[in-house]
Image (tube, rainbow, N blue to C red):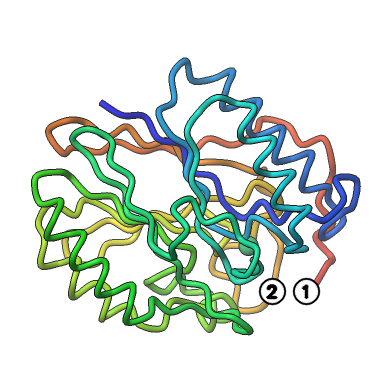
Amino acid sequence: MKTIVQISDTHLMDLPDKNFIELNPERTFHQIIDEILSRHQHIDTILHTGDVAQVPKPVTYQRYLNYMGSLNIPFYQTPGNHDDPSCFPYPQKSKLSVISLDRWCVILLDSAVVGKVDGLIDEEQLNHLEQALKQHQDQHILIGCHHHPLEMKSAWIDQHCLKNTDQLMNILCKYPNVKAVIHGHVHQEAEIYFKHIPIFSVPSTCVQFKPLSQDFALDEDTPGYRLLNLYDDGRLETEIFRVESMIEKINLNICGY
Ligand SMILES: [Zn+2]
């Protein structure tokens, strides 16, 4: 079995003491990591599904890499719409990362499009994805990207979804060993099915968006992360954990960012 932690939407600033939506994202990110380390004895890999930075400067990414590197747990990240691909630390120097974990294989896709809030998996990646899926048919597959492939029933969030979900899912549905898709972007927990494939979202490590809200609205829920236990026989168990108490109070009157 492999134990994976998914974190997302850290929205780190260029300086660690700066706030994002009246909250210090550095502090809540470190709080999440501290809770992960104290709650779970063994973690094989941490996956970050995008929006690593709110201020996407090299210094922001360097600080993230230094911090994650100090944990001595393998970690991988894929960009979100707030990240800058020109200085994003792609784990494998390409938009698509393939991570083998014995009986499982994680494929991270880059759904971010420069200058846009919504997402797309470009043709080149779709081609690489098909090649990777052909090569890894003897492993169980977990796919990760930033944008949500299926609607969350929240108008302001759904206008910024993945725009070529059908293209992606048509490929994934051809391979019965594809077990799940994980994503970030929506700052809330969800589990939605595309045919037989579960699609899981995760809370942000900083502010949460209010589920089912048609306009921008923050939620009082605390930051969280997703734990995934990937069994050798292809079964997958997953659970959301949230921090028990927030150091800072969310201002629910904020109406955009
Ligand atoms: Zn975000």
Residue 242: image location, x then y, percent: 59, 37
Give the secondary structure at mark 2.
loop
Q: Foreground: 131 or 177?
A: 131
Instruction: Please tell me in which quadrant of the rendered image residue 43 appears.
Output: top left
Q: Which amino acid does label 1 sit on?
A: Gly
For label 2, the residue is 216
Residue closest to the far right? 17
Contact flag, marks 2 and 1 (Cβ < 8 Å): yes
Check the picture and name the quadrant holding the N terminus. top left
Q: Earlier in the sequence, mark 2 or mark 1?
A: 2
Q: Which residue extends farthest front?
A: 93
Residue 111 vertical placement versus 232 (above, below): below
Q: In which quarter of the image is the C terminus?
A: bottom right
Q: Residue 99, located in which quarter of the rendered image?
A: top left
Q: Look at 90% across and 45% down and name the residue there.
A: 17
Q: Tell me which residue sits at (87%, 56%) in the image.
A: 22
Q: Which residue position holds label 1?
A: 256
| Neighbour tally class for label 2: few under 14, some 14-19, many 20 plus, Cα within 10 Å | some
